[in-house]
């Protein structure tokens, strides 16, 4: 965010939204969709695509946009080869993939869904980043009680000095 504030603190639902996106995007058979398609998968409301685009853009630790900035995916998916046949539910060998017609490669091949352990790692990371953002926010405010006490003390002294005849 431009003001230096963590995106985890920008909205009280942010952590829940990031976790929801991780869960849906990590297990859906297609690893990359448009913002509206992801919104539909997560909330059954494709009109909320801009809302989800903002989340994807503010959390590059988990999400990436394609070159045209029209689709989003999980960064973790990029480590896997694009040889998962969504209809067969399995990873194809390189030879099987090479034998496919171009139309199938373009429409029915994706990256393998993440494992439950992968999803847990990503969710734990989001929770840790959120917790750290809250702690950093608290640390920046350490001086507030001290300033209030000093302000009260100075006000009391000034009041006593001004009130003397």
Image: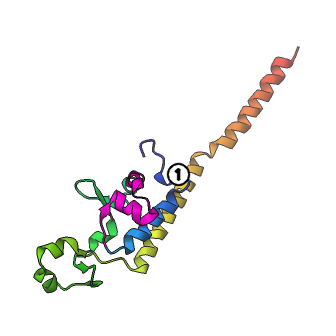
**Among the 4 quarters of the image, the one containing residue 21:** bottom left
Q: Residue at x 38, y 68 (%)?
A: 25
Farthest residue, direction top = 165
Q: Position of residue 78 (x, y in %)?
A: 27, 69
Q: Residue at x 30, y 84 (%)?
A: 89
| Residue toward you, 155 or 95 | 95
Q: Position of residue 139 (x, y in %)?
A: 58, 50
Residue at mark 1:
11
**Among the 4 quarters of the image, the one containing residue 154:** top right
Q: Quadrant of the C terminus?
A: top right
| Residue toward you, 128 or 81 | 81
Q: Position of residue 149 (x, y in %)?
A: 73, 38
Horizontal side, residue 49 vs residue 84: left or right: right
| Residue toward you, 128 or 44 | 44
Q: Residue at x 65, y 41 (%)?
A: 144
Residue 62 visible within the image: no
**Would residue 32 be counted in the magenta stretch?**
yes
67 versus 42 height, above or below: above
Dominant SS in magenta? helix
| Residue toward you, 19 or 90 | 90
Picture mark count:
1
44 versus 87 height, above or below: above
127 versus 8 height, above or below: below
Give the magenta-colored segment's residue range: 30-54
Q: Secondary structure at mark 1?
A: loop
């Amino acid at each position: 965010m431009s003001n230096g504030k963590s995106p985890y603190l920008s909205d009280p639902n942010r952590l829940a939204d990031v976790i929801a996106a991780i869960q849906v995007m990590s297990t859906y058979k297609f690893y990359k969709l448009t913002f509206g398609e992801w919104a539909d998968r997560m909330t059954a409301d494709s009109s909320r695509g801009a809302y989800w685009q903002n989340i994807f853009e503010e959390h590059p630790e988990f999400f990436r946009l394609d070159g045209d900035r029209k689709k989003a995916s999980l960064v973790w998916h990029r480590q896997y080869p694009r040889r998962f046949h969504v209809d067969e539910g399995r990873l194809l060998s390189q030879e099987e993939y090479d034998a496919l017609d171009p139309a199938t490669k373009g429409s029915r091949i994706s990256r393998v869904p993440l494992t439950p352990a992968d999803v847990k790692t990503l969710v734990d990371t989001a929770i840790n980043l959120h917790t750290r953002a809250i702690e950093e926010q608290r640390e920046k405010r350490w001086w507030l009680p001290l300033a209030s006490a000093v302000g009260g003390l100075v006000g009391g002294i000034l009041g006593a000095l001004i009130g003397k005849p």
